[in-house]
Amino acid sequence: MIKFIVISLKRTNSLNKAITLWRSDDSGYCSTLRCAGRYDEASVLEHLGYYNSGNSSIAVPAELAERLAIEVEYDAEEFGVCLPNDAATWKHLLAEVVCKTDYPSLPEYHGSCNRMEAYDQSLLTPDLTVPTGAVI
């Protein structure tokens, strides 16, 4: 059975070096993959609005997260194996979400548009940036 890791878009912002992950049993948040919970596919699919809403969380295969993870300084002088908070990582994660979300996923990472700004998501290029000359 496939295991999933739940990613918090709500708790990840452009200042974070690592993407924020859910701990097991819905018991808080962490940065390192070692501390992240692994959720059964059946549980995720049964509660899609909770685990995979799109605007606050997404569920991705744990195997994918493990392949993308690297050593990151996620806090002042604290290092661990984490998902780097960058455009390339988000591109891979968003392409492998468990299923289509109810709401658009607008991650914040260094160089991204602020999620609170009003802009048309359809203007985003595949690398999650706004094209030069786009009026938003």
Image (cartoon, rainbow, N blue to C red):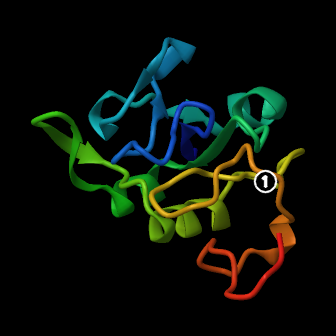
> Which residue is at the front of the view, 61 or 128?
128
Residue 112 vs residue 85: left or right? right
Q: Is residue 41 above or below residue 88?
A: above
Residue 121 vs residue 21: left or right? right
Q: Residues within 10 Å of mark 1 (few under 14, many from 20)?
A: some
Can see residue 60?
yes
Q: Residue 1, position in %: x, y?
A: 58, 44
Q: Residue at 41% x, 44% y: name it.
A: 15
Q: Is residue 8 above or below residue 118?
A: above
Q: Residue at 57% x, 47% y: name it.
A: 2
What element does badge 1 sit on? loop
What residue is shown with label 1? 99
Name the residue at the bottom extreme: 133
Q: Residue 14, position in %: x, y?
A: 48, 48
Residue 127 picture quarter: bottom right
Name the residue at the left extreme: 77
